Amino acid sequence: MDLGVLQAGFEITACVEVDKYCCETLRNNILRLDRDTKIFQEDIRQLNPRNLAVGKINLIFGGSPCQAFSLAGKKLSLEDERSELLFEFIRFVRAFKPQAVMIEQVKGFLTAKDLVGNSGGVFKTFVRQLENLGYIVKWQILSAIEYGIPQKRERIFLVAMTSDKFYFPSPTHSEHGNLFFLPCKTVGEVISDLPPPLKKSETIEIPQDSHIDITPLRDRQRIHGVSEGKYLSSQVHLPKEQICGLTKKDTTKFLRLDRNKPSNTLRGGEIFFHPTEDRYLTPREYMRIHGYPDDYVLCGPIRGRSGKVKSLDQYRQISNSVPPPLAKIVAEKIKEVLLCPKFMNFSDTR
């Protein structure tokens, strides 16, 4: 979101992030672009807004961890301590009183139960708290493929402003060949011009472009023979020892993407395979699918598909992030409203 909001023309005064590798990534790219952005590497619950010392703020934006609300997880909602981070927005909005707030979350946020079991109770409580602070709240589920991103990814964007002039951007792309829209971008379109990746055996350091093949031999063997656009457990013609313990429900494990279609939603738990080669996609190919420019550099380790780590490796940094082009177009719509005469008493856009 930092990159997309920056591309929309805002000055980012501060970022708050607890993961050390994400902070390394942010610092690296802030330094590269000669930006004046402060990084607070700490639990936001322990951060006093006064310590930011950033003055007047037009926009507060972010995406708190989604696991508590994800339909793919345990759906613990408020029983998961990570759900508390969502309400940190309220604390900071109350402190800074910005003209706008932009939040991204998974669709499960809409139906997450509150502590007494009411479906949608968390969302209603959150919206009500923003409204009590004087904001007009609008929300919409945005599909990444409808905005030129080659990935089937649906997320809620919530925008709260002190004006009712905000409207979400209209889609620009369509899967169905509509004459009024551009065709959806595909995996092949965005990764086909990349050179062959460096193999892990050829280097002891991660290349700066993160275009490196880390696929273990056993996973190369298991994906071999899987048709383009298919997943291993559906390939009943393959030997049982190749499928191993996978079941028909394992539709994201050992998935080979299709060059002629958008990607499935990038996730932190599994790494998708290249459409035609027996290897994982590289982090750089993931970044292309997510809408990152090639000059954006990731920091931190690259771990295998099933690695469980406390800090985020490069694949998880990408899949947990908001596609920059999507953050950009929503932020641009917010900026249009901020530049209306009502808000022109601000000399900058932060």
Image (tube, rainbow, N blue to C red):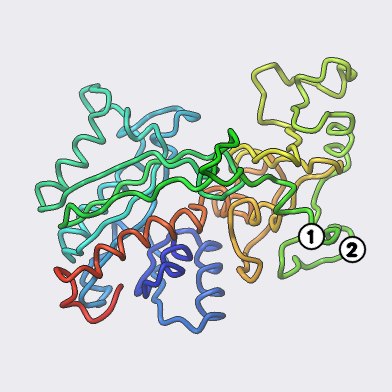
Going from the N terminus, do you reach mark 1 or mark 2 first? 1
Q: Nearer the viewer, residue 7 or 133?
A: 7
Q: Is residue 252 left or right of residue 131?
A: right
Alpha-carbon neighbours of circle 2 within 10 Å: few (<14), some, or many (≥20)? Answer: few
With 88 as the anchor, is 279 left or right in this view? right
* Residue 198: % across, % down: 84, 61
Which residue, given by chain and number where applicable, does mark 2 sit on?
Answer: 202
Q: Is residue 216 above or below residue 60?
A: above
Which quadrant of the figure has residue 25?
A: bottom right
Q: Position of residue 312 (x, y in %)?
A: 57, 53
Q: Which residue is mark 1?
A: 194
Tag 2's secondary structure? helix
Question: Seen in the image, is 246 located left or right of residue 220?
Answer: left
127 vs 49, nearest the viewer? 127
As drawn, 45 above or below 299: above
Residue 94 position by quadrant: bottom left
Seen from this angle, which residue lies furthest bottom? 34
Quadrant (top left/top right/bottom left/bottom right) for the N terminus:
bottom left
Q: Nearer the viewer, mark 1 or mark 2?
A: 1
Which residue corresponds to the image point at 10% horizontal and 53% vertical from the top-left? 134
- Image quadrant where one finds the C terminus: bottom left
Q: Amino acid at mark 2?
A: Glu
Residue occupying image coordinates x 65% and y 40% = 263
Q: How many marks?
A: 2
The residue positioned 70% from the left and 58% from the top of the image is 284
